Each structure stands twice: as C-alpha cells, then as structure tokens.
Image: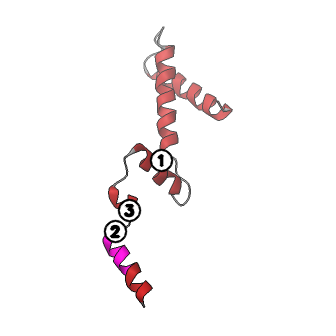
Amino acid sequence: MSHNKDAWVSQRAYSLWESEGRPEGRGESHWMQAMREFEQLELTKASPDGNDLIEKLKAAGRLMRIYDEPTLEVENERQRKAAL
C-alpha cells in the first residue's frame, strides 16, 4: 500500500469514528468503510483524456454498447471515403 492510500484511509476512518460520536469497538468497521470509499474513488479517477476511465468501465461491463463498437453509420462513412 502506498503512503497516500494509508494516510487517506486513516483520516477517513477517523472522520467516520468522530462523526458517529467516537463509539468504542467500531474501529475495524470504520477502517473497512474507508477502504471501500478509497477503492471507489480510485475506480472513478480518469486520465486527462478519459481513456483509462473508459477502459475501467468496459472491464466492469458498465459502458454502453455504443462506445464498444463503431456504429453502422461510421462504418458506412469509412467505406464511402475508402471508395473515393
């Protein structure tokens, strides 16, 4: 684990603990929640052009089909240009 991840998770878990009134015996659940939140944040990070996000969404099966394959119109336009 990187230092940044550990620091973020630690601070978030502490924040969750404080927001719940500092209950005893809930440290592990706060830590696990913070880990899940960090992982979700990592999944939503994108490169400046968004390509890595598109690949992550494809891998997760959450990207609409229109982006997976070229549309028929695009293919027809390519074929028309190639014939010219």
Left or right: 19 in relation to 8: left
Q: Quadrant of the N terminus?
A: top right
Query: In 3D space, how far apart are the residues under numbered discs 1 and 3 (Cα atoms)?
Result: 16 Å
Magenta part of the chain: 71-77
**Residue 30 pos. (x, y %):** 48, 20
Question: Residue 10 shows which numbered tag?
Answer: none
Judge whether 26 appears above or below 55 on screen: above
Q: Main secondary structure of the magenta part?
A: helix
Q: Residue at x 49, y 40 (%)?
A: 41
Task: Name the foreground residue: 8 vs 21.
Answer: 8
Q: Crowding at label 2, few (<14), some or many (≥20) Cα neighbours within 10 Å? A: few
Judge whether 44 appears above or below 7 on screen: below
Q: Residue at x 34, y 54 (%)?
A: 64
Q: Residue at x 38, y 62 (%)?
A: 69
Judge whether 72 appears above or below 69 on screen: below
The three-letter amino acid code for the residue at tag 3 is: Glu
Q: Earlier in the sequence, mark 1 or mark 3?
A: 1
Q: Earlier in the sequence, mark 1 or mark 2?
A: 1
Q: Which residue is mark 1?
A: 56
Query: In 3D space, how far apart are the residues under numbered discs 3 and 2 (Cα atoms)?
Result: 6 Å
**Residue 52 pos. (x, y %):** 52, 52
Q: Which residue is mark 2?
A: 71
Q: Residue furthest right?
A: 3
Q: Residue furthest top?
A: 25
The three-letter amino acid code for the residue at tag 2 is: Thr
Question: Residue 69 shows which numbered tag?
Answer: 3
- The reply to whether callout 3 and callout 2 are in contact (CB within 8 Å) is yes
- Count the numbered circles shown: 3
